[in-house]
Each structure stands twice: as C-alpha cells, then as structure tokens.
Image (spheres, grey):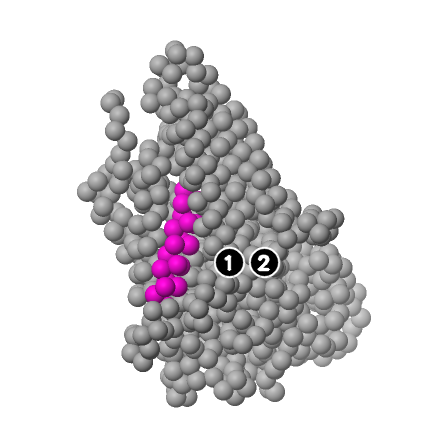
Amino acid sequence: MFEGYSLAELGSIFAMQGFAGLILFSVFVLMALGLAIIFGQMGVINMAHGEFMILGAYVTYLCSSFISTYAPALFPAYFFIAMALAFLASGALGMLVEWGMIRFLYRRPLDTLLATWGLSLILQQIFRSVFGAREVGVVLPDWLMGSVAVTDTIEVPINGLFVMGLTIAITVVIYAVMFRSRWGQGVRAVMQNRVMAGAVGINTEKVDRYTFGLGCGIAGVAGSAFTMVGSTGPTSGQLYIVDTFLVVVFGGAQSLIGTIASAFTISQAQSTLEFFLSGSTAKVLTLLTVVVILMLRPQGLFVLKVRR
Amino acid sequence: MSSDKIDADKLTSLPSPLRRKLLLGMAALPAVGLLPRGALAQALPTDAVNTTKLAVTDSTVKVGILHSTTGTMAISETGSVQAEKLAIAQINEMGGVLGRKIEVIQEDGASDWPTFAEKARKLLVEDKVAAVFGCWTSASRKAVLPVFEQYNGMLYYPTFYEGLEQSKNVIYTGQEATQQILAGLDWVTKEKGAKSFFLIGSDYIWPRTSNKIARKHIEMHGQKVVGEEYFPLGHTQFNSVINKIKLTKPDVIYASVVGGSNVAFYKQLKAAGIDLNKQVLMTISVTEDEMLGIGGENIAGAYACMKYFQSLKNPNNEKFVAAFKKMWGGESVIGDVTQAGYLGPWLWKLTAEKAKSFDIDKIAAASAGIEFTGAPEGYVRIHENHHLWSKTRVGRARTDGQFDVVFETADLIEPNPFPKGYQ
C-alpha cells in the first residue's frame, strides 16, 4: 500500500499515526481510571459507568447552552467550568447511589452487576425523558477545534492534545490522592483488609462513599471531555463500557499502573492494526489477543502483591 | 401446524358467491366515487370493504404504528412516528379512509428485533389492523417480514435501504440502494471531476451492500476505489482511518457511517484539519436528524445524497413543514426518513380508495400505479415492485443544520431492488 509515496510523506503519516495511537491511549486511560478505582479498589462491578460519563457530557451540554446564552464572554473558557461541574454532578450522584444501593451489596459482587445494570437502564431512560431520544450537539469553543500544523504535512488535532493533557493531569492527581495522601492510605487500607482498617479507627463506610464518588466523578470528567470526540445521547454510554472493562480487566483489576499499561498496549495495537487492516478486523484481532493473554495470565498484566 | 389454523380462518372468512357478485357490482359503480364524503360509509358497507375480518367498523378502521420509542434506535425512529401520526391526523381531518376514521394502535419495538416480530404478530393477530406503518432498520424489517407474509398484513416501511427484497406485503416508501447511490455518484463525477473514492461505513448489511453497488458503478466508469473500510457500530475512534484518507488523498470520501459513530467521525475529521469545503465528502447516511447530534459546524460543506431535504422549495413541502412544526414543535427537524414515513398513511389511503376495500390482497394488488401528488418530496408513484418512483437529490450541509439542495434528477428514478450487474 505504500508504492508511489515519497519518504517524507510516509514519515509524516507515521508520525501522525503514532499520535493517533497516543490520543486513543489517553481516551482509554480517561475512560478506565474511574472504573479502575471503583472496580479495582472496591471490587464493585459498575455497569452504569458509561451512564456516569454521559451525565458529565450532558452537564457540559447544559453548560454550553447556558453560558452561550447568558455569558457569551465566558464561552471560550466554559469547558473548564463544565468539567468541574461534571465532576461534581457525577460524583454527587455516585455518592448517592453508593448510599442508596451499593453499600447493601458489598458482600454480593454478582448482585452489584445486576443492580448497576438496572441502574444504567434507569439512567438512560431518565436522560431520554429529560433531554429527548435524539443526540444533542455540544458546541465547542473555536480554540478547541482544528489542528496545529507542526510541519507542512504533519497536523495534530488540538482536541487530541487537550485530551492528552487532561489525562496526564488527572492521572497525576489520582496518583497523589491515592498514594501520597492520608485519605488515599485509608482507601488502600480498607481495600486490603476492611475489618482491620475499621479496627484501627478508619471510618470504612465514609471511605467507601468517597471512593465511589471519586470514581464516578472522574467518569463525569471523561464524559465531558469526550463531547469533543464523540456523541452525546441517552445510550452513548454503552459505546464506552466494553472498552473500559476490557482495559481494566486486562491491566489487572487492582493496579492503577496496570490500567495505564493495558490502555497503552490495547490502544497501540488497535490503532496500528486499524491502519494496516480494516476497522472491524483490527477490533477482532485486538480482542483475540487480549483473550489469549488473559487465558495465559488470568490475573491481568499487573498484580498487586499482597498476602491474603 | 399453524398453517392449518390459517387455512381454517381463510375458509370461514371467504365471502359467499352472492356477496362476491354484489361486491363486483359495487366496484363497477363509478358513482360511488362521486358521493359526498359522509355518505361513503353507508355507500360502502363494512361487509363489502372488509371481507377478511380486519378491525374495521362502520365508522373506524384500526392501523398499527410499530417503531422503537425506547432503546438505541429511538433516536432515529422518533421522527417517523411523528410523521405517521401527522399524516393520520390530516387524513382523519379530511374524513378518514373510505368514510372511516383511522384509529392508531402504537407498539414499541424497543430496538430489539425479536420484539418487533412479536409486536407485529400482536398487531396482526389480536388487533387485526388494516395496515402497519413501521420498522426502521433492515434487521427489524427482516424480523417482521415472515410475520407479515404468514398472517397476510400490510407494512409501509419508510427507511432508505439496501434493496434485494420485494414482498407483496410491504410497500417500501424510502429509496432502495441504486436509487440513492447511482445518481449521486454520477453527479459528483460530472460536477467535481471525481476520479478516486474512499468508501467508509459502519459494519452491517446496509453500508456493505451500498458500497458494493457504489464500487461496481465507480469501477464500471473507469474510476478508482482507493480504500474501503468498515467499523463496528458504535465505534468512536477514527484517527487511524483519517490518516489513511490523508495518505490516499481520494477525490471523494464516500461515507455511510451511522448512529453515534457518525458524530465521532465528523468531529474527528474536522479536528484532523480536513476541511470539507475543500475535500469533497458525500454521505448517504446523514439527514437533518443526524445533523442535530453532529453539529452543523462540524459537517458544513459535506454533500448528502437522498430524496428529500427539509429545505426543499415546493408548495407541498412548505405546507408539510409548517404542519409538522405546528404539531411537534418549532424546533423539530425533518429528515429523509421522516418524510418517507409521512408518505405511508397517504399511500395506503389512496390505495384503499382505489381498491374500495381494506382487504390486504386487494390493497396489495391495487398498490402498483398509485400516485401521490401531495408528497412533500414532489410527485411519487408506486412501482409494480412495491417501491416508489422518486427523484434523487444532492444537498450541501450548512452550519445551521439544514441543507442547500444543489442538484436534483430531472426525472423520477425507477426503483430497481435487484440490480443486474451490481450483485
């Protein structure tokens, strides 16, 4: 397929292709971080993760129409306000759900699967009733659209850069919170041994609630960011849920580093294969590879070494 | 097993020889058509217009609407439901069909194909509706088709689709693939001097069949297909294929991506610096409905090829758009399929009046040649193969979510669901 192209052309295509892989990587990490916290740290299979993302997307939509009507001067910066609100909205809903539903199911992981699946259907119908069955269009500020021309032939999409920057920022924050703060220490303690953590004075219920809220809040931010690259409709969350679980399970459910490594592997494999083969075949091959690796290594890429 | 039951049903419902003679006499009476509307019901007694025990009384006739109002397809099918209800309301205002008011029984297919089949059976067997307006995806149509053929029902199907199907029990009010594709390709060749095409679509039967036809047509004319790609439904990452498009530099990107993927595709095209005012893109899957989600600013400049656009300028369409907005709100938009949905009830009414009967067999036989001059897209006629003769148009997307119609075929295009040389 490369006959008739000059070396410079090929070079720039490969550069752009590498970049496409990095964008996909950032998207995967952003999708999976929230779930990695909820599934990995708490062991809750949250099937409604996609709907928490879409809640963030709808908050962004409301924000964009509200600000463009009442405060057009703020419009170029509205995306940051929207992301903060998306975090708060999804996080608050997450804490509510934890309080009203999840906390009764901690000992029954398979029931959480059904319960959160039901929750995802309820949320979808609520979105449909409130915002209509059709997708809504989120208007982006101009500076987020278009691309930067690095050289004559290499163009880098700005929203891709934005997603990458956001992913790095959120990953750093999560790392700091989970591994460098007292609260994060509490979360990890509860995860390792709930009874003992309670015995040394950690309020495990509170830790659970905030952890779940944090995971959902990150999902909201991800959803907000994805209005730049994807659709916002009542069922759009379903588009992300499979990939998200794939990344988290493949990475080893309890390891945040594993999630990142797995997002990198899957995204690079998929985007390279997509370039050389066709879209559907690439997806099939990626999934096959993941299945084979999980058969050889059922615990995922990375395992947290703890004594059981 | 169940076929025994059907035969028994048919036997008991066969008209007596005397009644049949009477019927023939009735049909021959030209004066019936001249009677004032209120007198029609008396002039056409229920026994005469309904010999197969459909849900028809002296003053009403029941029809079904079968679309998804929940689930992933609700996005697309809502417009069809609205258009069908508008048409039925207008027909009732004019006095109904054969002097009988239309009553609607609406069922939800819930974006699930077995559910469609089950609801179709319910409408035909329990409700005994005289006609069903419904289905959207080919998968749902394929699921209900055996039901309609087994229980002898009548389905008016609104979506443009891949062709390769024809049934006595279905009237296809949207375009089949060759009607939609060929004229558009010819136009872009002539107008833009296109020599190379990149085909990209979602991975299911409609885009694949459409692209197969497109590829044959392109290659028959000595042009080149430089890429053909399919992505799973719901795919949201198109950066790799966009790079491939950049590498192959096609004159035309030919797109049949559907659903949520659509939004991702156009947003990422724009973000990657592909300016649709310079790069020709022709789509057969984006109507005004899809534009709402994509955002006009992301797709402005692209060409869409179908038979109807909301911005069409003709008296029928102006009336239709005004009535639609009055019934469903000023914000609503009308896409190709919505308009085709609107045709269904009207074509059925005209057919029933020609047949002077609600009987399915008579409706099916009388359908060929039915003309509807009040169609928003302009004059349409039903072909013997139960598809519509219709014009094909090319529209150019504007930032406000509407299309400028830049081309329409001079004549109606003959529907050809089994195109020779394209298989």
Q: Amino acid at mark 1?
A: Ile
Q: Is B415 situated left or right of B311 in this image?
A: left
Residue B365, position in %: x, y? 55, 74
Mark 1–mark 2 distance (CA, rounded to whole Å): 8 Å
Residue A26 lies in the magenta stretch: yes
Mark 2 belongs to chain:
A
Same chain for the residues under marks 1 and 2 in the image: yes
> Which of the two residues, A228 or B16, is positioned nearer the viewer here?
A228
Q: Horizontal and vertical percent for residue B416?
A: 47, 80
Quarter location, residue B174: bottom right
Vertical order, A55 against B219 (above or below): above
Q: Residue furthest front?
A: A151
The residue positioned 72% from the left and 68% from the top of the image is B320
Please name whichever residue, B95 or B157, is drawn nearer the observer in this view of the structure.
B157
**Where's residue B90, x and y in %?**
73, 63
Q: Quadrant of residue A257?
A: top left
User: Is residue B57 in view?
Assistant: no
Residue A116 colored magenta? no
- Indicate the quadrant where residue B26 lies: bottom right
Q: Where is residue B276? Give x, y as percent.
A: 54, 72
Query: Which residue is the site of mark 2?
Result: A143
Residue in the image at 47% along x and 42% along y: A169
Q: Callout 2 environment at 10 Å: few (<14), some (14 to 19), or many (20+)? A: few
Q: Quadrant of the N terminus of chain A?
A: bottom left
Q: Secondary structure at mark 2?
A: helix
Q: Residue at x 45, y 50 (%)?
A: A164
Task: Give residue B346's mark.
Answer: none
Reading the image, the residue beneath label 1 is A158
User: Mostly what secondary structure, the magenta segment?
Assistant: helix
Give the magenta range: A13-32
